[in-house]
Amino acid sequence: MSLGNQLDTLYRQVIMDHYKNPRNRGELDGDSLTVNMNNPTCGDRIQLQMKVEDGKISDAKFTGEGCSISLSSASMMTQAVKGLPVEDALKLSGIFSDIMLGKDVEHGDFDLGDIEALQGVAKFPARIKCATLAWKAMEKGIKEDEKA
Amino acid sequence: MNVLDVRKQFPILDQEVNGQPLVYLDSAATSQKPVQVIEKLDDYYRRYNSNVHRGVHTLGTLATDGYEGARDKVRNFIGAASTEEIVFTRGTTTAINLVASSYGRANLGPDDEIVITPMEHHSNIIPWQQLAKATGATLKYLELQEDGTIAMDKVENTITDRTKIVAVMQVSNVLGAINPVKELAQIAHKHGAIMLVDGAQSTPHMKVDVQDLDCDFFAFSAHKMCGPTGIGVLYGKKALLENMEPVEFGGEMIDFVGLQESTWKELPWKFEGGTPIIAGAIGLGAAIDFLEAIGLENVEKHEHELAQYALGRLEEMDGVTVYGPKHRAGLVTFNCDDVHPHDVATVLDADGIAVRAGHHCAQPLMKWLDVTATARASFYLYNTKDDVDVFIKGLTKTKEYFGNVFG
């Protein structure tokens, strides 16, 4: 069956794969940065845990409840930021925001990998907050860590 | 009531969304507006826009007549004894906040209790939470039965002589449950408490008579009953309103203003500080005329049939859970196994079908149902059986699509 091109740009195969088989789902052992965030308009929620060592995100895991877009985005986000220096993770978050705004982005040296599949979300304004939830949680965690 | 004739009066319904005819199933969030209301608003702004209650000039008189005429239409519509008991507010939320802030803060203390239900909309929870915090009073919840309806045999475990306020929605925006608010008002009164009814989801769909319910306060919004956004009503018994202080101070609500002290206008104007919602009230009056011409009993019967039809169709589907009792108002709230309600709503929208997904401003109820979110299709007088069929077909497609993902 076909749901039409418009929906197919949203529900790409790779998104459904992350939804069905989320990467880095679970909790980290030992000390870690823990951030809880929810999307008050819909009730989606995420707990993100990160280990930051020597200015790098050495590990990241998430748990939570949400739609295909928010959970697949969380899965992709953890995959993308693992091993990145903190400032690069924040830059990547900025690039992701721009993608969500439908901007043509210059992503330089960053390999967007699976994240690119989420660009179709930009055409569904009601769903952008689903996609950005995990990224906002990551930014919040890093900012809180820097303050501490 | 001929639903096809009714539909013709709602211009917005005659359009395509995403290449498909619009099927609007989100009237519990806000209803669409008939030409009669749209034209009345247009007419006000084109012909007699003017401030009320102060102009000596002709337009001012016309505007005042329109505004106060609407108040009398509201009075008649909900069966109130006097227009002094009809306060225009911004909506249901503002109306409930007015009671909590004015009556609540003046009359409650640390030994007192407020009783609501777990199914309330946030607008009938948070004002009471805040009131409890401010006064030291305790906020309590009535127990629900398995189908989501209030366990009436246990009500008096919660409503006791310590109870000062009971606040309950007449119709649940999620479960569709129709709560026995008249009976609850009797129990509240027996214990010396006052009864507030949140009528946001009932007033648009069934005949309301506040004197028959014998509630002390009744709140509702115009935009869910074919009227404009930004206006609603607080009905209150005169004896209570008379003893309440205003919560907003300024122009329009005063009697005499001195350098240090001022006095207030009589009811209901002391609660309507600032230039009132003139066009909104006139639009609400037009919505009432429209609904009364059709007859609320016809609206209720039509929606009941649609809801029962939709319920039956949903129950035939595998992997669909419907929430709430069988006897219900015109809405169905549901979830599909393995498909998040957001995804349901997005896929349906691609077929031009508008449903609501999320927590429906009822997070405590979502917790009670043990879900984070649900999808909801809600009906009004302009929906048809065909709308339900298109919705069920769309839902079947959605399930197939996501079923393939998880297959």
Image (tube, coloured by chain):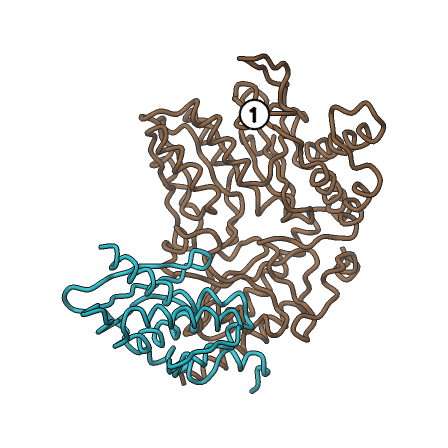
Residue at image x 83%, y 26%?
A: B57
Quadrant position of the C terminus of chain B in the picture: bottom left
Residue B255 place in picture, x, y as percent? 64, 16
Q: Classify mark 1: residues with Cα within 10 Å, few (<14), some (14-19) or many (20+).
A: some
Colour applied to chain A: cyan
Out of B184 and B200, give the one closest to the viewer.
B200
Dot 1 falls on a residue whose secondary structure is loop
Residue B327 appears left or right of B289: left
Q: What residue type is labelled 1?
A: Phe
Q: Name the residue under label 1.
A: B249
Check the residue under mark 1 and report the chain it is in: B
Out of B378 and A109, give the one closest to the viewer.
A109
Number of callouts: 1
Residue B210 appears left or right of A58: right
Task: In the rendered view, tell whether residue B143 sits above or below residue B108.
Answer: below
Quadrant position of the N terminus of chain B in the picture: bottom right
Classify residue B45 by image quadrant.
Answer: top right
Residue B182 place in picture, x, y as percent? 53, 36
Residue at image x 73%, y 45%?
A: B287
Q: The brown chain is which one?
A: B
Task: In the rendered view, tell whether residue A67 sits above or below residue B176.
Answer: below
